[in-house]
Amino acid sequence: MSEPIVLRTDALRKRFGSLEVARDVSLSLPRGCRHALIGPNGAGKTTLINLITGQLKPDSGTISLEGEDITATPAATRVRRGLTRTFQINTLFPDLTPLEAVTLAVCERQRTAGQFWRGLFAHEEAIDESFAILTQLGLGDVATRTTRTLPYGQQRLLEIALALATRPRVLLLDEPAAGVPKDESAVLFDVISALPQDISVLFIEHDMDIVFRFATRIVVLVAGGVLLEADPETVRTDPRVREVYLGGAGHA
Amino acid sequence: MSDVTANAPFDAQGWLRRQSRWSPLEVVFWLALLLPFFFFPTYLTLASQIAIAALFAISVDLILGYAGIVTLGHAMFFGLGAYAAGLISVYGWGEPLSGLLLAAAFAGLVGFVVSFMIVRVQHLALIMITLGLGLLTYELANSMSWLTGGTDGLRGIRTWPIFNYFRFDLWGYTAYSYSLAALFVCFLVSRRIVNSSFGLALRGVRENVRRMPAIGSDYRGHLQKIYTISAAIAGLAGALMAQTTNVVALDALSFQRSADVVVMLILGGTGRLYGAIVGAAIFLIARDQLSGVNPQYWYFWIGLLLMVVVLVMPKGILGGLSALASRWSGR
Amino acid sequence: MVNQIAIVLFDGFAFGMLLFVLSVGLSVTLGLMNFINLAHGAFGMLGGYIAVLTMRQLGLPFLLALPAAFLGAALVSVVFERTLFRRLYKAGELNQVLFTIGVVFVAAAIATYAFGTVQQVIILPSWLRGSVEVFGLRLGVYRIFLIVVALAVTAVLVFGLERTRLGAQIRAAVDNQRVAQGLGLDVERIFAITFALGSGLAGLGGALAIEIVGLDPAFGFHFLVYVLIVVAVGGLGSIAGSFAGAALLGIGDVAGKYFMPEIGSFLIYLLLVAILFVKPLGLFGKR
C-alpha cells in the first residue's frame, strides 16, 4: 500500500437526464496495481472509464493523474500523459494491418505521425518497437494481415497492443476478454498479468474466477456508486455484494 | 519476447518498405501517359484536360479517399486557384510557374482557414458546410464581377512561355507537357504523403476516428494539415486550367465541378491515387466520345454508373480490378 | 415601405411553408435512419409530374391531384427503399450520397426523356387564383392556401407523432434504435413506413410547388440545396426545427432576392455556413 497514487478521482458525478450514472465516485489507483471493477450490467462501469479517459465530461468532481488535475484535459492529451484505455467492443482499424496500426500509435506517442515528408519505413525505431509489442502479445505471425481478417481473440489482443504502444502508466481495460471463450480468456489475462509491474491496471470483468485470480483489489460499482472497495477475500464474503452481484445474473 | 529470435526474424521494416515500392506497372502507366504526344496529337487538348482533372481528383482523394472527409464543394479551391492565376496574369504577370505556385499558395491559405470549420463537424453538417462554402464562393465570384468578369468570365489572360522559351502552341503540345509535368510532380508529393506516417494516421482517421484520441492522436490537426494540402493542390489544378486555356469562367467554381470530380474519383476508386487518374480519364474520354448526344442522357449513364459502382464495386474500377487480380493469383 | 416588408414577409413565409412540406420528410428519415437521401428532391419532382399528368391526362381536379402526388411518390419511394436504399443504411455517408445523387441524375434524365426540358404549368381552379385584400395588403390566395396546407400537415404530423402508436414507435426508434429493437419493435417496418410518408410529403410539396416555382427536370437538384439547408439548419428528426428552418429560409430567400438581388443567394449560403459552424447539429438538433 505504500506505492504512490497514480490516478485519483474525487467525487465524480454524471447524469443522463434523470439517470445518475456516476454518483460521487472516488477511486485511487496506486502504482503497479491490478484492480478489478465489477458490478451488474448498467452499473456504470464503462461510463466511469469514459469519464476518467475524457470521452465524457463529468458534471462535477475531479480527476488527477500523478497529482495533476486533468479533469478538463482533452482525451488525446490524457493518453499522451499515460492514461490509456481499451474498448469493450473492438475499436480497431479494420483495413490496417496490426503492424501499421501499432506503428501509428507509436508514432503518435513520439509525435512524429504528422511528418508527411518522411516515408513510413524511415521510422525504423517505431516499427521495431511496434513489432516487439505485437510479438510480446503473440501477434507477431499475423502482424501483416489485415485486421478485419483476424480471429476475434487476436483482435482483442490487438486492442491491448494498441494501448501498450502509448506507453501507459495507467491502463483501463474495459472487459478485455468480452466475447472470448473461457479457455482463451485465461490466456488473455496471462498476458495482462505479465504487463510491466509499474503500469497500474484497472480492468472490468464479469467472470468472477478471473477477477479473484488476477485482481489484488476489487471495486464494486452499483447504480453508479461505489458499493465497496476491498481485497478479493472481503468482497467474496460481503453479503451485500453477494446480493446485488453474485446472487444475481452476474455469475455466468 | 524470445520467439522473435527463435524463428527466422521477420523483417517488419522491410515489409513496410515493400508496401511503398514502385512497381513496374506504375512505370508503364506513366510511360503510357506520354503516348498522346506520338499517337493522338489531335487529342492533346483533351489529354491536358484529363491531366488537370486528374490532379483535381487527386486533391479530393487525399481528403475523401484517405482521410474520409466527404466534400461536395471542392471546386471552391479549384476555382480560387484558377481565378488567382488568371488575375495575376491579367494584372501583368504572366510567368506560369510562379503564377502556379502563387495560386496554389492562395488556395492553400483559404483551405487552412476553412479547415478550422471542417474539423468541427461530421456527417450531414460536414457535407452541408462544404456544399455551402462552395455555393458561397460561386455567388461571391458572381457578384464581384468588377474583379472576376462575372458571368462573362475573366478576360485578358496571357500566359508567357514556360522558362521564357516554350510557347503555348495551338495544338497543345506545351499545354499537355506542362500539365503532365505538374500532375507528375504533385503525384510524387501525394505519393510520399500517403506513404508516410502522416498518411497512415489519415487512414487511421478514416478507418476509426473514435480510436484516434485513444492512441493519443490529435487527429484534428492531421485533418487540418491534409485539408490545407488538398486545397493547395486543387488550386494548382485550377491554375493549370487558367494558364493552359487562358479562360476562367464561373463554372470553375460550380457545384457541377465539385460533383463531377467526386464521380471521377468513385469511378476510378477512392483511397488510391491511380484511381483519381484513371477515373478522370474514363470520365472525360467517355464525355468526349458521347458529346454528340444530349447532355441529359450523359447524366443518365453517369447516374446509373454511380448506382452500380456503389452497390457492386464500392472500391471503384481499380479496386475491382485489384480484387480480381488477387483472386486470380490465388490469394 | 411597411407594406412592402409585410408582403415580403408573407410571401417568404408562404415559400417557407412550401419548403417545409418538401423537406420535413427528409428530416424525419434522416433522424430515424441516418440515411442521407439526396434523392429526396427527386421524389418531390416525381410528385410534381404525377400532379401534372393526373390533371392533364385524367382530368382530375387540383385537389385530387395533390393526394395522387402524395400516394404516387410514397409508393415509388417505398419500392426504392425496400429494394435499394436499405442496402446502404450501414454503408457510410459517402456511398449514400453518391448512390442517391446517381438516382437524381437518372431521374432528371428520365424526366427529360418523358417531358422535355420545358417548364410544366398547371391550371389552378379559379378559387385559388388571384388575391384578396387583408388589412390593406393584397395577399395571393394560393399562398394563403399553401400556408393552410402546411399548417395542416404540421398539425397532422405533430398529432401523429405524439398521439398515435406508430408515432410513439417512430420516436422510440429515433431516440435509440438498439433499444427500440430490443423492445421488440419492427424497426425495418417503421423505417419503410416513415420513408414512404416522408417521400409522399415531398411529392405533395412538388405538386404544390409547380404554381410557385414551376417544374422541370432540374427540380430535384434545384430544390435539393434548399431542402438540405432546411434539414441541416433545423436539426435532424425535429419537426419544429424543420418548420423554423423552412420559415427562416423562405423569408430570407424572398427578402434577400427582393431587397438585395445582387447578393441575395450569397447571404443565404453565408447564413447556412454560419449557423452550421456555431451549431453543427442545427438550431433544434439534439444529436
Image: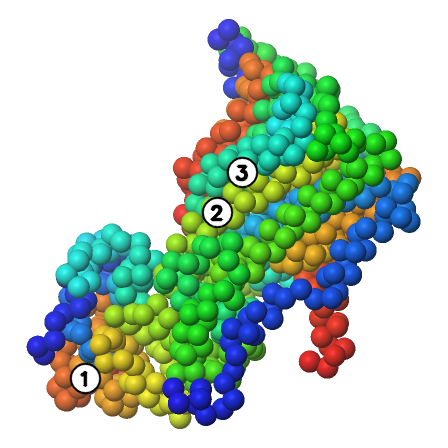
Q: Residue furthest left?
A: A2
For numbered disc 1, what is the local secondary structure?
loop
Secondary structure of the residue carrying tag 2 is helix
Picture layout, residue C101 above or below residue C125: below
- For disc 2, the chain is B
- Few, some or many residues within 10 Å of mark 2 (<14, 14–19, 20+): some
When asked about the image quadrant of residue A31, the answer is bottom left
| Foreground pick, A59 / A120 | A120
Label 2 amino acid?
Lys
Which residue is label 3 attached to? B108
Asked if the residues shown at circle 2 and circle 1 are in contact, with their CB atoms under 8 angstroms apart, the answer is no
> Which mark is drawn over residue B225?
2
Q: Where does the image place residue A63, in percent across and percent down from the top left?
A: 19, 60
Closer to the camera, B144 or A215? B144
**Quarter of the image containing the N terminus of chain B?**
bottom left
Question: Which numbered tag is attached to residue A216?
Answer: 1
Distance from Cα at disc 2 to Cα at disc 1: 46 Å
